[in-house]
Image (spheres, grey):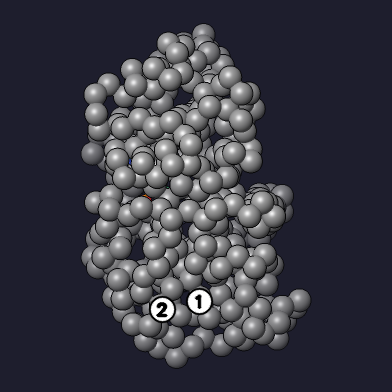
Amino acid sequence: MKSARLVEFGAPLQFEEKSDPIPKGTEVLLEVMACGVCHSDLHLRDGYYQMGKGEKLFVKDRGVKLPLTPGHEVVGRVLQVGPDAKDISLGEVKLVYPWIGCGDCEECEDGTPQLCSAPKSLGIYQDGGYSDRILVPHPKWLLDTHGLAPEYACSYACAGLTAYGALKKSLPLSKKDYLLIIGAGGLGMFAAQILPLMTDAQVIFADLDEGRLAKIRELGFQTVNSSEGDVSDAVRKFSGPKGVSSVIDFVNNSATSSLAFSLLKKNGRMISVGLFGGELKIPTPILSLRSLTVRGSYTGSPSELAELLKIVSEKKLLPIPVQVKSMKEADSILNDLSSGKVLGRVVLSDLRI
Ligand code: NAD
Ligand code: ZN
């Protein structure tokens, strides 16, 4: 088993080779075929989230233990199964649902393990897919890929699912409503792919990068470059002076969240998704007087992921831009994400080191 591992926060990943784990009980060992690189892996390597005013929320205080193999967007082929793993056969190709919970709490019992307070997510609290092998605790976390190519299917486990969950929370929206989406990176591209199936609202994307915005315009959406001029004015040129009905913030730092809040029209909804970090100051009377909703959104449930994969395969949606790279490049890809050089998603597919 060869893996790229996080051994020290803030330091480059290190390669490690050891013998393959042998699945016990209900465990399933998969050969990793593709693993998406998420911006959250970068926050994990940093070891903290920005909380505003220079304060940090350290991932070690949230239960992350090193060394750890990152990677939570995984498609793999079943190599070996534990003696109690049922309804799974060797050779099957599956998408891993990584947002595993404790299995005992109300959220886990309700089918929303992503909201469990004692999470065991793969690639965050347990070893993930920056490896040629991944050990999954139970076959129930393995989903049908509906024949999608591994390098396109894998990122639905996080980027696709998160975009889907956030879009659902931004609804209902009618044809005359405006939806602003901040961030046209991995999550934003998935939102652009899925949203025509979910709403006919008028959509504006904002990002700092002209290349990503050009790709978004090709898909037929309006764009605003956040690095130029007054962003609020630029958005209102499309939406009119009252602002937008919903905002999804895939960046969610101090600047984007206060922009998002200031652009909400009465009864508007703001969905905070990104983990770039910062803080948002809200005068409380404004929330009531303008009847606003501010809420967060974290990934999605196994049933939502299964539902999403089915929709994507049935509607034959055009894939988002994907660059396939080798695991040897994992660390430099994280650096590229940090400096905003990635268009769409980078997927590790050659897992040799
Ligand atoms: P990414 O690096 O692929 O994309 C980020 C995009 O935001 C880039 O296009 C960048 O140019 C743009 N951007 C950065 N600062 C901006 C600003 N001030 N104004 C406008 N655009 C700006 O990242 P990603 O993988 O799409 O992830 C986005 C964020 O969402 C990360 O913080 C990630 O950790 C987080 N995330 C959250 C969840 C969740 O469930 N809540 C799930 C996955 C990822
Ligand atoms: Zn992710």
Of residue 246 and residue 148, the one placed in the foreground of this image is 148
Horizontal and vertical percent for residue 13?
29, 70
Between residues 11 and 163, which one lies in front from this camera angle? 163
Q: Residue at x 40, y 45 (%)?
A: 215
- Amino acid tagged 2: Leu
Residue beneath disc 2: 351
Query: How many badges with numbers are in the image?
Result: 2
Mark 1 sits on what residue?
32
Q: CA distance from mark 1 to mark 2?
A: 8 Å
Circles 1 and 2 in contact, beta carbons < 8 Å: yes
Mark 1 and ligand 2: say if the CB distance to the nearest ligand atom is below 8 Å.
no
Dot 2: what SS? loop
Q: Residue at x 52, y 62 (%)?
A: 152
Q: Residue 2 vs residue 74: left or right?
A: left
Q: Quadrant of residue 345?
A: bottom left
Placement of 245 over or under 90, stated as above or below: above
Q: Nearer the viewer, residue 156 or 229?
A: 229
Quarter of the image that includes the N terminus: bottom left
Disc 1: CA contacts within 10 A as few (<14), some (14-19) or many (>=20): many
